[in-house]
Amino acid sequence: MSRKFTAVDIFSGAGGMSIGSVMAGLDPILAIEFDVHAAKTYETNHPKTKVLQKDIKTVNPLDTTEKYPFILFGGPPCQGFSAANTKTRNLKNPNNWMYKEYLRFVKDLEPEWFLFENVIGFRSFGKGKFAIEVEEELKSLGYETSSTVLNAANFGVPQDRKRFFIVGHRIDKGGVKFDFSTLRREKIVSVGEALADLPSLNNGDKIEEHSYMER
């Protein structure tokens, strides 16, 4: 019997990470998202996945899915860590403590792997001590971890979009520690290059389908 590589997506949004996981051969079986519109969009994108539109603080992981999924991933609310936030980028912002819900899910479900994502301001928040403490807490749950900042522009996306990642693997499962340096970088694509083959339209055109231009 072939192994099922199940995935749990928390703070799922509309399901962008789950789309990537499906492309990698994973099977998202559960998603949790508080925003009703994002949750409905997720359901449309992933009709086979169980979606809970709830406040994650009210969710008992073991009441919603089985223990030991292959991977758990998600990005807790990031507004309180963003360097662009000049008003509530501090410890008084309640969203800054939502990462504890992520830790709770890792502790209760004990996935073989986890992936944690946030804005790069997460790594610099509190002069860097905050991210270090969070990673240490994840290590204390029995995981070997790696962390870094990745830019979507290095992976074929025509956008300068940097994000902070922590990846962890259960020590008792053995295997090689995840190494971010092994990720294959691609040629940086500009927005102009990405849009260059779109068909030419005139203002007011209402054409449902049109062939791409030849380069």
Image (tube, rainbow, N blue to C red):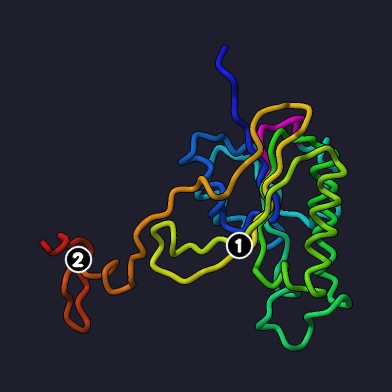
Q: Is residue 100 left or right of residue 194?
A: right
Q: Which residue is mark 1?
A: 149
The residue carrying pointer 2 sits among few (fewer than 14), some (14 to 19) or many (20 or more) residues within 10 Å by Cα, namely few
Q: Is residue 114 magenta?
A: no
Quarter of the rendering containing residue 71: top right
Q: Main secondary structure of the magenta part?
A: loop
- Estimate the x, y position of residue 66 in percent, counting from the top left: 76, 30
> Who's the residue at 19% across and 65% down the image?
197
Q: Is residue 149 left or right of residue 54?
A: left
* Position of the C terminus by quadrant: bottom left
Frontmost residue, 74 versus 180: 180
Q: Which mark is residue 63?
A: none
Q: Which mark is residue 197?
A: 2
Dot 2 falls on a residue whose secondary structure is loop
Give, as a single range, the part of the protein colored magenta: 65-73
Q: Is residue 49 left or right of residue 25?
A: right
